[in-house]
Image (spheres, rainbow, N blue to C red):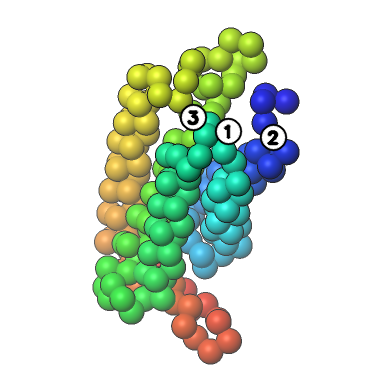
Amino acid sequence: MLGLTPLGAVHTAISLVAVAAGLIAFWRDKGITPANLLGQVYIWTTVLTCLTGFGIFERGGFGKPHALGVLTLLVLGLAWLAARGSLFGARSAAVMTVSYSLTFFFHMIPAMTETAVRLPVGKPLADSPEAEWLKVAAGILFLVFLIGATLQLRRLRRAPGGEAAPRYDRPGGAVDSNM
């Protein structure tokens, strides 16, 4: 089906859950936060998307998609550190918010690329993942990310206590959400 291996199909299904959770979080909560179930679903399905992606070598060995997976995991780690609240101080909420939004942007790159090289079946929109128009589209998506992140940061600055990030260092792992 669409040239997907069984692992590729599982990877795609998990990533679709992550993207759906992210879209709903942006719509409902104006951002992704680990302080609620929707944010947690996004985070864990994003981790699983990265991990399953490391087993896909359709276009040869370790490549750009694998590097993006590593980068995504690093940015998720940064967001997790920011959620703990101590490393970035007053900027913790901003670092966490922009980091989670950046991981969503990272989802969009392979989503757009893989869709373009596979659909419509028999006559895909792009001949290769390196098609010039895909690079332009990725640039446009990056501009959308920058606009969205700017709006999120403005919202944080306006919110009372908006600079405080949810903290996860309470005994028993309890969440102290100031957002």
Q: CA distance from mark 1 to mark 2?
A: 9 Å
In the displayed structure, 106 sits above or below 164; it is above
Q: Nearer the viewer, mark 3 or mark 1?
A: 1
Of residue 31 and residue 96, the one placed in the foreground of this image is 96
Circle 3 residue? 112
As displayed, is residue 39 above or below residue 130?
Answer: below
> Which is closer to the viewer, label 3 or label 2?
2
- Badge 3 vs badge 2, beta-carbon distance below 8 Å: no
Structural distance between the alpha carbons of marks 3 and 1: 17 Å
| Furthest-front residue in this view | 61
Out of 56 and 123, give the one closest to the viewer. 56
Residue 5 is labelled as 2
Q: Measured from the top left, where is residue 135 in percent x and y?
A: 35, 26
Q: Amino acid at mark 1?
A: Glu
Outermost residue toward the top?
Answer: 123
Query: Residue under circle 1?
Result: 58
The amino acid on which the numbered mark 2 sits, given as a three-letter code, is Thr
Q: Residues within 10 Å of mark 1 (few under 14, many from 20)?
A: few
Q: Sequence-wise, which precedes: disc 1 or disc 2? A: 2
Q: What secondary structure is found at the residue carrying circle 1?
A: loop
Answer with mark 3 or mark 1, whichever residue precedes in sequence. 1
Q: Residue 97 placed where, x, y %?
A: 38, 58
- Left or right relative to 11: residue 114: left
User: Which residue is painted at 28% across and 76% down in the image?
Assistant: 89
Task: Decide which of 129, 55 is in the foreground and name it.
Answer: 55
In terms of secondary structure, where does tag 3 sit? helix
